[in-house]
């Protein structure tokens, strides 16, 4: 990626725009990425973070459930998917998913994050049946399920309109949607890393439809592969423009690319500096998105902690299963679990105030140390 000198005066100019509450433009975003002054960029992001969320840092007690790794999409960055007849392919039945959820529920999880591969044969009743059974068994469990890419795929394989898919999922118990599948929204980069996936425009269109149906979602960006700074800024502006129309995004999550086990394993992945800068620029560009998540699974616990001083106000959750999706991109030296005590001490160690939240950022109070602690 091109490094060009960005003068202190240029950073001052951007800082003044931020102070005046003006949204940053494309060139501002690119200058922030090109700047070598990570501390100055981080300082600006930290100020915005504190003005939006004060010292609060959110986490939740959740469980990821990856119902199948069978996928037809063949994304170059993905080490998780398997073809349908591959010996490592798996498909969980609804009953198996309910048992996993029961275990999570007993450990205090109140959010299930449900995503899977794009299965070539499953019909709509699998997806609706899964949500219905989970809601029937655990009425107070929040079901954050299916990315825009899965919603697109379900519509195509089951020959249903977007509205039919969205309405059917909501009636079955869908509460919100995770932010995956956004990758890099712009072309030609998107086609180079995931040629067979839902297009960027379609991802945005479906997000808008889901928001208009009253369902909040998250948004992600996969960075640190072949994309340019311009791709990143374009991605952020596309999200900001949609958010201006719907206000449906709760949280933005920059996802650090993990090359191991993927068709792009020749790439090094992002540096720590790049990850902090990406968190900071995301906070600055997405002035209308309330929360920026430092996803500790991919960043590593220590860098995620530092990110709480560079614009992030959320660390995601405590409990995660041993599913292979997470294994496929776990940061070096990370295990896939963080207890509540550990997460609270990471947050306090960054001089922040830990707040356990539900999926929609309402604070939750519990008996002290009832979970994993
Ligand atoms: O869409 C896939 C990414 C996403 C790799 O909404 C990879 O709260 C890095 O979206 N290296 C799925 N990333 C995960 C996701 C997510 C995670 C946490 C919280 C939320 C939320 C959403 O993971 C995919 C893709 O962008 N991904 N492979 C990889 N090798």
Image (cartoon, rainbow, N blue to C red):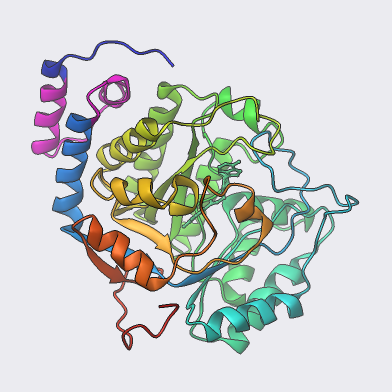
Q: Tell me where residue 368 appears, x and y as whole percent.
A: 31, 85
Q: Tell me where residue 243 appears, x and y as whole percent.
A: 35, 48
259 and 67: which one is in front? 259
Residue that appears at 72% across and 58% down: 160
Q: Tell me where residue 185 appears, x and y as whole percent.
A: 52, 34
Q: Is residue 172 above or below residue 270?
A: below
Magenta stretch: dominant secondary structure:
helix
- In reply to whether residue 21 is colored magenta, the answer given is yes
Q: Is residue 8 above or below residue 328?
A: above
Residue that appears at 70% across and 51% down: 153
Q: State which quadrant residue 168 falls in.
A: bottom right
Q: From the viewer's perspective, tell me whether residue 283 is left or right of residue 133.
A: left
Magenta region: 11-38
Q: Quadrant of the C terminus?
A: bottom left
Q: From the viewer's perspective, tell me whether residue 94 is left or right of residue 227.
A: right
Q: Tell me where residue 308 appears, x and y as whole percent.
A: 27, 50
Q: State which quadrant residue 174 falls in.
A: bottom right
Q: State which quadrant residue 366 falls in.
A: bottom left
- In reply to whether residue 105 is colored magenta, the answer given is no
Residue that appears at 78% across and 73% down: 93
Residue that appears at 31% across and 60% down: 346
């Amino acid at each position: 990626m091109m490094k060009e000198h960005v003068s202190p005066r240029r950073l001052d100019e951007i800082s003044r725009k931020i102070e005046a509450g003006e949204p940053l433009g494309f060139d501002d975003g690119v200058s922030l990425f090109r700047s070598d002054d990570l501390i100055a960029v981080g300082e600006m992001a930290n100020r915005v973070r504190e003005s939006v969320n004060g010292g609060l840092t959110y986490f939740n007690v959740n469980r990821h459930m990856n119902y199948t790794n069978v996928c037809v999409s063949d994304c170059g960055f993905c080490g998780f998917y398997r073809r349908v007849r591959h010996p490592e392919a798996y498909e969980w039945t609804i009953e198996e998913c309910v048992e996993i959820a029961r275990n999570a529920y007993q450990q205090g999880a109140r959010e299930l994050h449900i995503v899977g591969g794009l299965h070539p044969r499953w019909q709509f009743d699998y997806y609706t049946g899964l949500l219905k059974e989970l809601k029937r068994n655990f009425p107070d469990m929040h079901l954050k399920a299916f990315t825009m890419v899965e919603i697109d795929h379900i519509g195509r394989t089951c020959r249903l309109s977007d509205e039919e898919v969205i309405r059917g999922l909501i009636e079955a118990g869908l509460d919100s949607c995770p932010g995956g599948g956004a990758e890099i929204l712009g072309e030609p980069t998107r086609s180079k890393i995931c040629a067979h996936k839902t297009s960027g425009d379609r991802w945005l269109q479906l997000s808008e439809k889901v928001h208009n149906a009253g369902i909040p979602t998250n948004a992600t960006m996969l960075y640190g592969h072949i994309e340019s700074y311009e791709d990143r800024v374009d991605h952020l502006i596309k999200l900001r423009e949609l958010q201006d129309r719907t206000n449906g995004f709760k949280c933005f999550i920059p996802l650090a690319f993990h090359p191991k086990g993927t068709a792009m394993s020749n790439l090094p992945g992002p540096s720590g500096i790049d990850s902090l800068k990406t968190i900071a620029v995301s906070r600055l560009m997405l002035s209308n998105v309330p929360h920026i998540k430092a996803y500790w699974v991919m960043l590593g616990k220590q860098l995620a902690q530092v990110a709480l001083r560079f614009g992030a106000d959320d660390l995601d959750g405590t409990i995660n299963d041993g599913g292979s999706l997470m294994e496929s991109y776990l940061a070096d030296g990370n295990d896939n679990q963080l207890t509540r005590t550990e997460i609270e001490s990471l947050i306090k160690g960054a001089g922040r105030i830990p707040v356990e939240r539900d999926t929609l950022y309402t604070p939750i109070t519990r008996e002290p140390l009832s979970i994993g602690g």
